[in-house]
Image: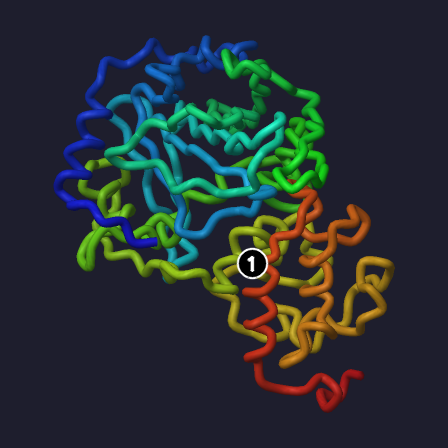
């Protein structure tokens, strides 16, 4: 995702935003407010949503959320920075200081007759730190706050007029209609559903951010010598002097599987019993599901025998579940009700290019 802007001008714009007068930080000892506006970190100005005392970012590879567009921001306590946790590969993650708040606002462009367009807008970040609100519908804003006892997740549901958003601890299901007349349900997750994706380990007790990792931030290029993560380093938002190995800027199946599936399928996550490890750095074909029978065959397997059959997407459970919209079959289980046709095609092409034949693997 190359961005045609001067790196120095971009950095100057971001630094200018970071130096604006800060709102009073919401006390860590208090629960997050009932109204998003009370938090003071996202404000509407001149038909745009802007951040205060923070910076807007995007990701090279994003979680599919029924084609909704996302406006992301990070708000660090003054005088602090994130730190890259030691790792030998691009799977390194960022440790954010206590007091950090991460926001993610979901929107759809308006269509006629109260419908929405399933069209992902261009990423809004850097110098263009505001989200234009003309002709869009605000749906929800998700908040991750790093408190003294760990991360907490809260969803805020915007009113229909887009005037303010209100805590929705029990979640919501929004009945929407796409521009072509097809109806679908958009899920605003409750607190337990937030933990299902953001929770680390099978018990889902320790929440953590998923998207803003060095390799995925660095996948957003500014020029041949500068990327988004390098801007974070230069601005002092992260303590890290190392060159980060970025994920590919162009769509790539393994990065897609990592950001959409690996928060559960990572060897120790909530789906560890499946035996799948879909992280970007996984190298063993068996861990990726190649010629691997399902642990518990059932409706979700679609009558297929292995997770990934090289050269045969149509015989692969992974491809089958990604391409399904039945809640009892589809993967991921949360966060979507529509099928990501582009993502499914990307994974199909990856499977098609794999070498081997499960019929001769001695397992079938």
Q: Residue at x 63, y 50 (%)?
A: 264
Q: Position of residue 342 (x, y in %)?
A: 56, 58
Front residue of 237 and 160: 160
* Left or right of residue 6: residue 125: right
Up/down of 68 relative to 320, above or below: above
Front residue of 85 and 291: 291
Q: Mark 1 points at which residue?
A: 342
Q: Which of the colour schemes (rainbow, by chain, secondary structure, one colour) is used? A: rainbow
Q: Residue furthest bottom?
A: 360
Residue 127 quadrant: top left
Q: Position of residue 235 (x, y in %)?
A: 20, 37
Up/down of 130 relative to 308, above or below: above
* Left or right of residue 56: residue 152: right
Q: Position of residue 316 (x, y in %)?
A: 71, 71
User: Alpha-carbon neighbours of circle 1 within 10 Å: few (<14), some, or many (≥20)?
Assistant: few
> Which quarter of the figure is the C terminus placed in?
bottom right
Q: Which residue is drawn at 67% across and 73% down?
A: 313
Secondary structure beneath dot 1 equals: helix
């Amino acid at each position: 995702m190359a961005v045609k802007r001067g790196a120095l001008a971009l950095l100057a714009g971001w630094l200018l935003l970071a130096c604006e007068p800060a709102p009073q930080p919401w006390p860590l000892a208090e629960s997050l407010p009932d109204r998003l506006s009370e938090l003071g970190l996202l404000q509407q100005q001149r038909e745009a949503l802007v951040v205060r005392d923070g910076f807007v970012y995007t990701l090279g590879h994003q979680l599919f959320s029924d084609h909704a567009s996302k406006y992301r921001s990070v708000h660090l306590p003054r005088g602090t920075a994130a730190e890259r946790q030691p790792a030998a590969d691009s799977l390194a993650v960022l440790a954010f200081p206590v007091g950090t708040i991460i926001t993610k606002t979901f929107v759809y462009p308006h269509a006629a007759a109260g419908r929405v367009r399933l069209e992902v807008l261009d990423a809004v970040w850097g110098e263009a730190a505001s989200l234009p609100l003309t002709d869009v519908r605000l749906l929800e804003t998700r908040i991750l706050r790093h408190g003294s006892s760990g991360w907490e997740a809260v969803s805020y549901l915007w009113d229909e007029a887009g005037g303010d958003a209100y805590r929705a601890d029990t979640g919501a299901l929004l009945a929407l209609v796409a521009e072509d007349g097809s109806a679908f349900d958009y899920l605003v997750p409750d607190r337990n559903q937030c933990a299902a994706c953001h929770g680390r380990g099978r018990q889902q007790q320790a929440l953590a951010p998923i998207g803003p990792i060095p390799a995925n931030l660095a996948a957003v290029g500014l020029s041949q010598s500068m990327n988004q993560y390098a801007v974070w380093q230069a601005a002092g938002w992260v303590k890290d002097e190392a060159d980060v190995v970025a994920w590919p800027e162009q769509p790539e199946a393994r990065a897609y599987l990592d950001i959409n599936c690996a928060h559960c399928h990572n060897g120790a996550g909530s789906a560890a019993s499946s035996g799948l490890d879909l992280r970007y750095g996984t190298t063993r074909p068996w861990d990726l599901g190649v010629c691997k029978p399902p642990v518990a065959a059932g409706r979700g397997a679609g009558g297929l025998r292995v997770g990934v059959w090289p050269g045969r997407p149509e015989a692969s459970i992974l491809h089958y579940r990604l391409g399904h919209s039945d809640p009892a079959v589809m993967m991921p289980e949360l966060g979507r009700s529509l099928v990501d046709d582009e993502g499914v095609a990307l994974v199909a092409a990856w499977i098609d290019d794999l070498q081997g034949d499960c019929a001769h693997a001695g397992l079938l």
